[in-house]
Image (spheres, rainbow, N blue to C red):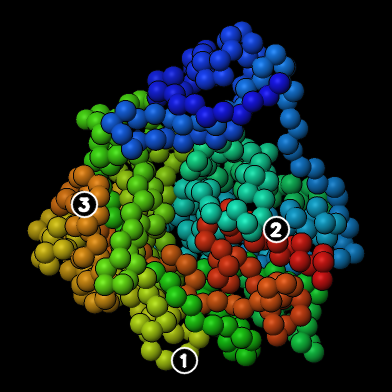
Amino acid sequence: MQKDIEITVVPHNIDNEAAITQSLAKALNVSPNKIKHFKILKRSIDARSRRVVYRMQVRAYIDEEYVVEENTFKYTKVSGDKKVIIVGAGPAGLFAALQCIENGLKPIVVERGKDVKQRRRDLAAINKQGLVNTESNYCYGEGGAGTYSDGKLYTRSNKRGDINKVLQIFVQHGADEDIMIDARPHIGTNKLPHIITAIRETILEAGGEVLFDSKLTDLIIKDGSVQGIVVNQEHEIHAKSVILATGHSARDIYELLHRKNILIEAKPFALGVRIEHPQDIIDQSQYHCDIRSEYLPPAYYSLVEQVKNRGVFSFCMCPGGIIAPCATGLDEIVVNGWSPSKRNNPYANSGTVVQVTLDDVQGYDPLRMLHFQAEIEQKAFEAGGGDLVAPAQRMIDFVENRLSIDLPKNSYLPGTKSSMLDNILPEFVSESLRGALPLFGRKMKGYYTNEAILVGVESRTSSPVRIPRDKETFQHPQIKGLYPCAEGAGYAGGIVSAAIDGVNCANAILNN
């Protein structure tokens, strides 16, 4: 007999099978020796009271042996009879390719950047020398931006597709099985490159193609239908289905569509800063302790406020993480965050951003939000003085409108420069942050402190452009066979939701 039940476990017993069995036996009112096996279905930390516990949904096998479940997906070889071009090798593109193979279609993945191994050299140049390769950076390259942004797999996209299938595919390619049960799963930036490489190998073994250093420079369209693409301004690849999964930072793609009079739309996004605290401050606040237990992971937080009817919220929180330079062009500053799998760095950072609406940027140009975003990033670069040095300010100094005399130690490798962030951020963003940060401090003890640093700017929260598509067919309303996909098109917001959207686009091709 199997029974599902929720139990609580103190942190030091989280890996103690005997203690968990005892808790199950007590909750089910049976003898411990009747429980032959248990399987953890979901696990989360409950830190609402001073006694921090793990809450676990567990399936107990009472007088019944457990049979190991087979959860691997097998990919049979595909022919080249029906090809699908997938532009972008981020999570959307890679999962679209896997789904195409499941559907008997041959995927041809074209990626403007390099494979993950070659990409590391360009990231080293960004961090150590402030040099940006505009085709290979934290956003462009195999695995997309997700490869170097912690690998957070938390999503609310339950109704869009099969989340468990996405997680299982990650496990099949090398991710820890804990991502299947943790309430806020993550893989870790240090582990993702190996997993992405394994996914690529699966695609190749099944007869798909993956082409690096292959930048989409034109679409081949005839009589309102896509016929293929042009790569690097000279090489044509032909297919009657193109999935456009280029990510939220491929500005040249939006400009290409606009030049070709293919409909795109301005889209709201969010803008702000990345805020970093010593991890100890976050641990002490969230776990109500002086020193975090070795059985608890570094603590995270999620904060939101309304300031004069404008949303201010934390975004992409990285416990034990690092602030990274994520510019994709020259003379711009963009910051993001990531964590290794152990989340064992001494700092915690989070994007803290303000809603930017279409009414905030006047005009009718569908690229106006993109141009607004770019202008702020260029101001940040100028304020830092070059070499990707980022403008920064201590938290209370920012709220009280004074220049920081010095800056705390932080994780941003290119370096920080004390600056008045008011001179970079739009007034409505500064004022919204200024109103929200003390309120965050009331919700979370220790948060509002001058030990925290604000680093500018966090501007790539989502795409500032939407590429429209039909709700049923997933095709662009003007171009048959063109499938706008995931974050770059405005239909996803993270690794899992992007992967699901890639799967959905691949299935739409089969059904159309």
Residue 202, percent from left and from top: 74, 47
Q: Which mark is residue 441?
A: 3
| Labelled pair 2, 3 in contact (Cβ < 8 Å) | no
Q: Position of residue 150 (x, y in %)?
A: 47, 48
Q: CA distance from mark 1 to mark 2?
A: 33 Å
Q: Is residue 317 left or right of residue 418?
A: right
Give percent across and percent down for residue 245.
63, 66
Between marks 3 and 1, how big is the CA–CA gap?
39 Å
Indicate which disc, 3 or 1, sits on the residue closer to the N terminus.
1
Q: Residue at x 16, y 63 (%)?
A: 399
Q: Residue at x 57, y 19 (%)?
A: 28
Whether residue 170 sits left or right of residue 397 in the image: it is right
Q: Which residue is mark 2?
A: 503
For the N terminus, the image quarter is: top right
Q: Are marks 1 and 2 in contact (CB under 8 Å)?
A: no
Which label sits in the foreground, 3 or 1?
A: 3
Q: Give the answer, above or below, for where 473 lies relative to 300.
A: below
Residue 385 visible, this angle: no
Dividing the picture into quarters, in which one does residue 100 lie?
bottom right
In the figure, is residue 480 to the left or right of 499?
Answer: right
Find numbered disc 2 in the image and state the secondary structure of the residue it sits on: helix
Q: Which residue is mark 1?
A: 364
Chain-order first, disc 1 or disc 2: 1
**Crowd band around label 3 with a 10 angstrom C-alpha radius: few (<14), some (14–19), many (20+):** some
Amino acid on which disc 1 is placed: Tyr
Type of the residue with mark 3: Gly
Secondary structure, mark 3, is helix
